[in-house]
Image (cartoon, rainbow, N blue to C red):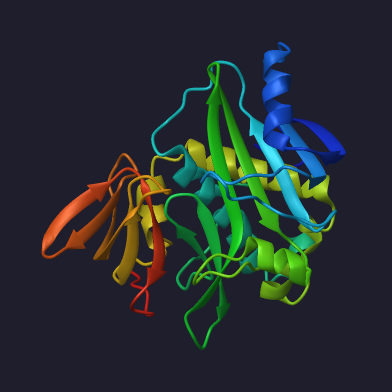
Amino acid sequence: MSVQEPFFRLFSFRSLGSTMDEARALARSGFSGAAIVRADTQTAGRGRIEGRRWVDAPSQSLLMTLLLPVGFAEGQALPLRVGLGVVRALERIEAAKVGDAGSMPLEPGSSVSSQDPKFWLKWPNDVLVQKSTDAAEYGKLCGILCENTEGRILIGIGMNLRRLEDKIVLMQHQPDLPPACLEEAWKKLPEVFSELDRAAHFVAGHVIEALSDSRWKSEYERRLWGRGSTVQFLAGHPQHPTPMLGTCIGIDEGGRLILDIGGAQKTFVSGEIASLRVAKLHLV
């Protein structure tokens, strides 16, 4: 699928309460195709965990929800594969040396090297950027929220593009993981992200590619934040988590996180990696 010939019908708004809510209303109205609902700003953006908001400034972030078409078969580990698609889109720009991204072949399917990842996947639904090559400093760049409404799959994506206002930094901040943006990571915003509708189609194309890729698990694990390191993990319900320490091993075929805790491997279907206790990440 070419980015110039989008599979999705685009619905753009200056302001919405939530692109997810608008996409849900679109599905309930009888629209059966694939759509991108994008807004310059949201007044009621939310995250995966109840009580967490996604706060933005107008036109400073990519705020979108993908509504997948009727009959789209949901595969395993949907939020993980969506995150992989987002990272692939960013890596293709990175491989194009950023400044020339507008003239480089950035369509899904073009080759990209990830020997030394700059963008990482925080299980289960965040994209991080390494803020410094000299130290293990990471910031949250993008959040992902997947929902199923009456058989329709909705994929919410919120990505910080431009420098954040101080008040937004404070509102997005989470312990051990400050927010980050693409403009800071690359010193300037690549051309493909300078126009938000174009950016939405660009990211959507790479997400669809990842959803149909049988190699997704190994590709995800290469970019898994904390793999090979001791992590602090918050297991169970986010409002009443059980904290524990373990070595991050990887994920299984269903997308469950595998930790080595006291010499025994355990899998988790819910929870959150809160922080790394060992800075160096493991690459295979």
**113 in relation to 215, above or below:** below
Q: Residue furthest top?
A: 30
Q: Which picture quadrant has residue 45?
A: top right
Q: Which picture quadrant has residue 34?
A: top right
Counting labels gives 0
Q: Residue furthest left?
A: 263
Q: Pick the quarter of the image with the N terminus.
A: top right
**Residue at the spot 67% in from the left edge and 62% down from the top edge:** 171
Residue 79 horizontal side relative to residue 42, left or right = left
Query: Percent position (x, y) of residue 92?
Result: 62, 60
Residue 104 horizontal side relative to residue 151, left or right = right
Residue 147 appearing in the image: yes
Query: Percent position (x, y) of residue 183?
Result: 74, 70
Q: Residue furthest bottom?
A: 134
**Residue at the spot 52% in from the left edge and 50% down from the top edge:** 83
Residue 106 appearing in the image: no
Query: Percent position (x, y) of residue 13?
Result: 86, 37
Q: Residue furthest right?
A: 14
Q: Pick the quarter of the image with the C terminus.
A: bottom left
**Residue at the spot 37% in from the left edge and 45% down from the top edge:** 237
Residue 133 horizontal side relative to residue 115, left or right = right
**Residue at the spot 61% in from the left edge and 67% down from the top edge:** 95
Query: Percent position (x, y) of residue 181?
Result: 69, 67
Give 197 or 27, whichever is nearer the viewer.
27
Give 255 or 43, whichever is nearer the viewer.
43
Give 239 or 186, whichever is nearer the viewer.
239
